[in-house]
Image (cartoon, rainbow, N blue to C red):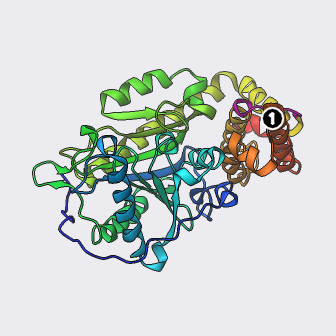
Amino acid sequence: MAEKRKTEKTGGAGKPAETQANPATFAKAPGFLAGSWEREPVVLSTRVRLARNLASLPFPRQASAAQKREVLESCAKAFASLPPHKSGTLHDISKLGREERTLLVESHLISKELAEAGDAAVFLSHDQTCSVMINEEDHLRIQVVHGGSRLAKAWKSANELDDVLCHAIRFAFSPRLGYLTACPTNLGTGMRASFMLHLPGLVISGQMERICRALGTAGITVRGWLGEGSDAAGSIFQISNQHTLGHSEKAISQQLEGWLHEITQQETNARLRLLESDNLRLFDQISRAFGLLRNAILLTSAEAMGALSLMRLGCDLGLLPPGLRSTVDRLLIEAQSAHIQSTHDARNSRAEDSCRAMLIRRKFLQVPEPAFHRLMEL
């Protein structure tokens, strides 16, 4: 059950937020990668998502085209009432090309489902740390993403935006069930919190299957790099709460943070065991990946993700400069297919692989080779 009921607040209107498409903006690394926050060995980012629906209209999958357009119009008016520091731009999905939509998916700003939806839109804050998907599975999916393990900050931002929107939109709410959602697992608070984790130690040591089973039993969902249905490219996983009904926002946060602490400890121990059992092989993997990124002429997305993962691990172990982490984190996004195609005008797979290799070679040109002498100190 949600901790506070905000759906009685209605009213507020104004001119719809301006709708425009700016592909150049989409090709930049998303806002959660920017800023001066300290990069962490395990946690790449934190996300809080709130599912909300308009009280007077059916869920998107049961709604007619006219009803979906009514949702869009109501949301546009609501976004127009946002204060300047929360303002942004509303993008009509149907007016974006496939490349622009894929850019948004790769940047974790929209889902694959929204990218294929009709009569849908996404509202993006100017710093791209906040996005609101309209007419995906629910009428609104409010999500805030911040770099590192900053769950309290992400929740605060999402909750503040929810507070503002509920003045302009009457959300579907039941005193018994909480916020009503298209999927029963989101009933109650409608809140999904998640962490994006880099877990190379557990992957290399073959322990991820065991970890996933334990998390599933505890009500925690494990997904890949791009969410549901995606692979864990680069040893990157997303963990989130499975259920919301009967759990407060505080309880959900505490449960997820408890499991984050456990997984971080397991990953740390896995890395230590790898160093103790066969540090030469681990260093060889990192060194080979460095050579690939520094010298490759053609580089696929999968190759880049795997090698960049090992570079991040090298930073964590002190074999590479710690400042390289921020470069690697940006490349995890900027080396994705749509980003390469957009920024380098690569129109076939061979050109894409060539441009990706060139991009990464340039980024690693001045990076010193892995410090082999540090191996003796580990």
Whether residue 297 is in magenta: the answer is: yes
Q: Nearer the viewer, residue 172 or 199?
A: 172
**241 with respect to 104 (left or right):** left
Identify the residue at the far left of this view: 176
Q: Nearer the viewer, residue 177 or 3?
A: 177
**What quarter of the picture does the C terminus occupy?**
top right
Residue shown at 30% from the left, 33% from the top:
219
Q: Which residue is mark 1?
A: 353
Residue shown at 17% from the left, 45% from the top:
246
Residue shown at 46% from the left, 72% from the top:
86
Q: Quadrant of residue 76?
A: bottom left
When the figure is inspected, residue 40 is found, relative to residue 308, above or below; the finding is below
Q: Regarding mark 1 in the picture, which secondary structure is present there? A: helix
Q: Could you say where residue 258 lies in the image, as x and y percent from the top left?
A: 35, 44
Q: Please say whether residue 154 is visible from this viewpoint.
A: yes
Q: Nearer the viewer, residue 173 or 12?
A: 12
**94 with respect to 144 (left or right):** right
Q: Could you say where residue 156 lies in the image, as x and y percent from the top left?
A: 37, 64
Q: Could you say where residue 178 lies in the image, as x and y percent from the top left?
A: 18, 52
Q: Which residues are magenta?
A: 296-303
- Tell me the crowding category of disc 1: few under 14, some 14 to 19, or many 20 or more residues within 10 angstroms, Cα based: many
Residue shown at 33% from the left, 40% from the top:
61
Q: Amino acid at mark 1?
A: Asp
Identify the residue at the far front of this view: 66
Q: Nearer the viewer, residue 75 or 45?
A: 75
Q: Could you say where residue 124 lies in the image, as x and y percent from the top left?
A: 51, 62
**321 with respect to 140 (left or right):** right
